[in-house]
Image (cartoon, coloured by chain):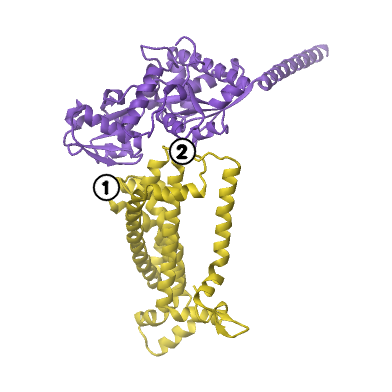
């Protein structure tokens, strides 16, 4: 009965070899992870298509390759990430450009190191049935806004651009019920929705793409909708942290480039990561990927002139009380090829 | 609230009634001391630990915010107060009416009671936007939200209160050939009042929260709107100033209900003190 013994022995040797190899690999991975720098990143809100580059980097190993062990968490409110990075309760945060100017007024030590979405996503969105094909068509209509100060300022700027008076267009504060108030015809248009999220949701519900006017077409200076924020004081005092930030930015930019070339992989990743349905993501993710690289600049790049222009607009619209120098809230030092 | 029969009202060595200031001091002094100590500790810790004001401002910063822009806070307070008072009034009227209906009809009680309990499990943050869409961007959905949050303790306590009557009294009324309505009016309703007021006091503490949820779903004014505006601006002192005003509204409403109870059913308080 030699054969069964031989087969059994060979099987045992193969099993042992697999176990040793697997264990080695596990140990190698563990060692690699132990060597990797842990990075806590607080998102601006729950995972959504705006975060496609981040999740692509996470799931495709861009962060791991850069020696980073990245953990992402969603905040309980959108203003929290900036506060957390300011007090070093999180290593990095995703926030919004206006928040950095508000933070500067409060001497919050936060600084932008890269753009996550380098164009305005906030848009005036109107159903086609409202026949708002240009801004002047808003006369006599109702626009729903969230009520937050920056959206109010966008509304006021839009009126100025369209040569309309406040009496010409009714402004209703709908809180964050933008899509429902538009779909139920309580308002004719909304400000505060994003062209890559709410505009697509509305279009899918009414089976017709809505009219979309991004904020920079309403007279608002161009700005970065989502930005990556680090602690300014820590960047100066902690060389290891500065290196981590540089690696993170490099990995994010590489991931954004790869995601743009692999939209279907990006859609799959966002399907696994978010609660949005597949048909929505099939439209939203490619739309977002296309917006990650405006023609005039590289991925992740931020422009000091653009930031100063936006800061000046915030001052003019009384969103901030004193002028803020763009160089105090953003830096290009961690970017390459901009 | 003090009465002449409460022990603290009398100095037991001299057997004389203490002055009002002394009586209030004995009744409310401990609570005021605790609040004062808490505020003092908060001020001290925030300063000592250099906590940034956008994270947690000092009590003195919150107090300063009242004077900086008191016009904004004052006008917002009137708006929210209107929502709280009218919404609370609707909750009381609807809650009492429902409690009476459930007590008088066993069929209604069996049909509606489980649904009433289930209604309280629906998060108001889910319901509020739907109500705003249905009723429009005006005061109406806010009144409904306040009423929805406040009516349940009034209903439950009302039903329990009406059922807590001594059965001997009911038997006695029946032997005197009293009608069902007469039994309810003369025995069950007065018996239920102390518990109804107890439930109403609980509801009073929730009314302000209901108004805030309503304003967060769509408003152009009110303390909720002020908080919505102040949060992205990192004006945490303003947010806390609004919270202080909301707490004051809740407290005043609670005390108002206690005062109405004292005036409506003075015998209930004497019974409690006798026991």
Determine the image quadrant of residue A78. top left
- Rendering coords of residue A16 (x, y %): 77, 17
The vertical placement of B139 against A103, above or below, is below
The vertical placement of B215 against B112, above or below, is above
Task: Decide if residue B156 is in sight here.
Answer: no
The chain to which mark 1 is attached is B
Question: Considering depth in this image, is A254 or B22 the residue closer to the camera?
Answer: B22
The chain to which mark 2 is attached is A
**For residue B46, side relative to residue A157 (left or right):** right
Q: Nearer the viewer, mark 1 or mark 2?
A: 2
Q: From the image, state the color of chain B.
A: yellow
Respond whether the residues carrying marks 1 and 2 are from the same subunit: no
State the residue at coordinates (41%, 68%): B256
Which residue matches tag 1? B136
Q: CA distance from mark 1 to mark 2?
A: 26 Å
Figure chain in purple: A
Mark 2 burial class by Cα count in 10 Å: few <14, some 14-19, many 20+: few
Q: Which mark is residue A77?
A: 2
Question: Considering depth in this image, is A188 or B155 the residue closer to the camera?
Answer: A188
Task: Decide if residue A50 is in sight here.
Answer: yes
């Amino acid at each position: 009965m030699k054969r069964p013994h031989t087969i059994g022995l060979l099987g045992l040797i193969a099993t042992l070899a697999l176990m040793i190899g697997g264990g080695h690999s596990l140990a190698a991975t563990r060692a690699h992870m132990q060597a990797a720098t842990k990075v806590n990143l607080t998102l601006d809100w729950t995972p959504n298509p705006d975060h496609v580059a981040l999740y692509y980097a996470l799931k495709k190993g861009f962060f791991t390759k850069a020696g980073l062990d990245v953990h992402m968490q969603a905040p309980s409110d959108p203003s929290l990430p900036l506060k957390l990075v300011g007090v070093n309760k999180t290593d990095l945060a995703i926030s919004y450009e206006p928040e950095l100017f508000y933070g500067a007024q409060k001497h919050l030590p936060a600084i932008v190191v890269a753009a996550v979405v380098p164009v305005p996503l906030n848009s005036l969105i109107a159903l086609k049935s409202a026949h708002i094909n240009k801004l002047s068509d808003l006369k006599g209509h109702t626009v729903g806004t969230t009520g937050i100060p920056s959206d109010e300022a966008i509304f006021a700027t839009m009126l100025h651009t369209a040569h309309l008076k406040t009496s010409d267009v009714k402004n209703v504060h709908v809180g964050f019920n933008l899509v429902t108030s538009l779909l139920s015809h309580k308002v004719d248009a909304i400000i505060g929705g994003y062209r890559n999220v709410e505009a697509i949701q509305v279009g899918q519900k009414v089976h017709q793409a809505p009219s979309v006017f991004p904020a920079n077409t309403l007279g608002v200076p161009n700005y970065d909708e989502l930005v990556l924020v680090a602690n300014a004081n820590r960047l100066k005092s902690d060389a290891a942290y500065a290196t981590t930030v540089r690696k993170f930015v490099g990995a994010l930019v590489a991931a954004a480039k790869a995601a743009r070339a692999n939209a279907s992989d990006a859609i799959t990743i966002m399907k696994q990561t978010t609660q949005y349905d597949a048909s929505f993501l099939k439209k939203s993710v490619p739309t977002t990927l296309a917006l990650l690289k405006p023609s005039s600049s590289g991925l992740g790049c931020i422009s000091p002139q653009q930031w100063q222009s936006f800061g000046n607009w915030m001052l003019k619209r009384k969103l901030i009380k004193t002028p803020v120098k763009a160089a105090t809230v953003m830096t290009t030092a961690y970017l390459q090829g901009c | 609230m003090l009465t002449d029969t409460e022990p603290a009202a009398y100095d037991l060595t001299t057997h004389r009634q203490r002055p009002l200031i002394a009586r209030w001091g004995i009744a409310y002094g401990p609570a005021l001391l605790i609040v004062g100590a808490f505020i003092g500790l908060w001020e001290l810790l925030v300063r000592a630990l250099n906590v940034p004001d956008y994270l947690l401002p000092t009590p003195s910063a919150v107090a300063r915010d009242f004077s900086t822009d008191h016009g904004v806070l004052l006008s917002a307070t009137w708006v929210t107060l209107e929502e709280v008072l009218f919404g609370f009034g609707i909750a009381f009227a609807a809650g009492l009416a429902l409690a009476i209906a459930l007590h008088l009809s066993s069929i209604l009680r069996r049909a509606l009671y489980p649904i009433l309990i289930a209604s309280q499990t629906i998060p108001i943050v889910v319901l509020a936007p739907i109500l705003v869409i249905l009723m429009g961007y005006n005061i109406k959905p806010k009144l409904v939200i306040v009423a929805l949050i406040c009516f349940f303790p009034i209903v439950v306590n009302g039903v329990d209160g009406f059922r807590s009557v001594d059965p001997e009294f009911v038997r006695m009324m029946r032997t005197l050939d009293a009608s069902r309505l007469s039994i309810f009016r003369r025995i069950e309703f007065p018996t239920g009042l102390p518990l109804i007021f107890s439930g109403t006091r609980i509801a009073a503490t929730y009314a302000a929260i209901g108004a805030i949820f309503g304003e967060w779903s769509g408003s152009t004014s009110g303390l909720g709107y002020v908080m919505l505006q102040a949060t992205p601006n990192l004006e945490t002192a303003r947010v806390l100033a609004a919270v202080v005003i909301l707490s004051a509204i809740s407290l005043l409403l609670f005390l108002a209900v206690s005062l109405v109870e004292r005036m409506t059913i003075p015998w209930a308080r004497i019974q409690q003190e006798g026991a």
